[in-house]
Image: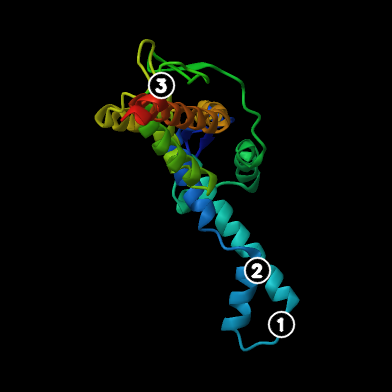
Amino acid sequence: MKIIKINEKEIEIPTSWFDVSFEQFIQFSNISKARKSEADVISGYKNDSNESDNEEIISLLVSIDNVEFNTKIVCFWTGLDESEIALCSLDMIEDILKTIDFVGEQYNPIALDKFTFNDETFLLPKGGMEDENFGTYIEAEQVELNNKRIENGDFGYLPRQIALLCKKEGEKRGLVDEVMIEERTQKFKKLDMATIWDVAFFLLKQENKLMMHSLTLLQMEETQKLLSQQKPLYQVMDG
């Protein structure tokens, strides 16, 4: 965190994803998604104005929209309202925006096999487990559903995905305890985004393998049951 002084207040500004919780990330994402595109700003001007297209006016409208968006971003990360931000110098605003520019940079995940949160250690899943059961099949279907939602840009399911797949030492996969999963989902919303990104990157690579492994084992098990129920050919011929 970087501490800056604004209007006699000491404000903490995040300098990396380690300083940003999942909840903050979702709030920030909602602000970003609500932003108008430059094309929307121009289209709005053309639809609402009786004037002929004026490039200078259009340029100013786009500039004003950028300023309004940056104001919302600075207000969000500082926790100050617009009236307080309006009293800041341009240099101060520029410094804040530069400090948080990591949110627009590509994140390079770190490989890990476990993470610790609130003094509790959670293990990431391993492929090729031998103790698969019907519970892991149910779990795999939930994981795949969440995976599709995440791939479609709904990052709100990341904490639940982590709660489903990451276990404490001694916990077995396939024991789908909905109460515990929901409790951990809420807990993981407080995780820092660096850990979220690292874990999510691993899970998005692994979970499809785990799902296919679970489904394959279940299919093999059901096939074996059917074969065991069949009579040998000589018994059928003998009636």
- Label whose residue precedes the other's in the sequence (2 or 1): 2
Q: Can residue 67 be seen from the camera position used here?
A: yes
Q: Amino acid at mark 1?
A: Asp
Q: Quadrant of residue 65?
A: bottom right
Residue shown at the point (38%, 21%) measured from the top left: 173
Crowding at mark 1 (Cα within 10 Å: few <14, some 14-19, many 20+): few
Q: Quadrant of residue 14?
A: top right
Q: Can residue 189 be seen from the camera position used here?
A: no
Using the numbered discs, state the Cα–Cα distance from disc 2 to disc 1 in whole angstroms: 14 Å
Viewer-side label of 2, 3:
3
Q: Report which residue position mark 1 lands on.
A: 53
Q: Report which residue position mark 2 lands on.
A: 39
Q: Amino acid at mark 2?
A: Ala
Q: Report which residue position mark 3 lands on.
A: 132
> Is residue 71 found left or right of 59 in the rendered image?
left
Q: Amino acid at mark 3?
A: Glu
- Label whose residue precedes the other's in the sequence (2 or 3): 2
- CB within 8 Å, label 2 to label 3: no
| Circle 3: element type | loop
- CB within 8 Å, label 1 to label 3: no
Name the spot of residue 109 as percent of width and height, x first.
62, 27
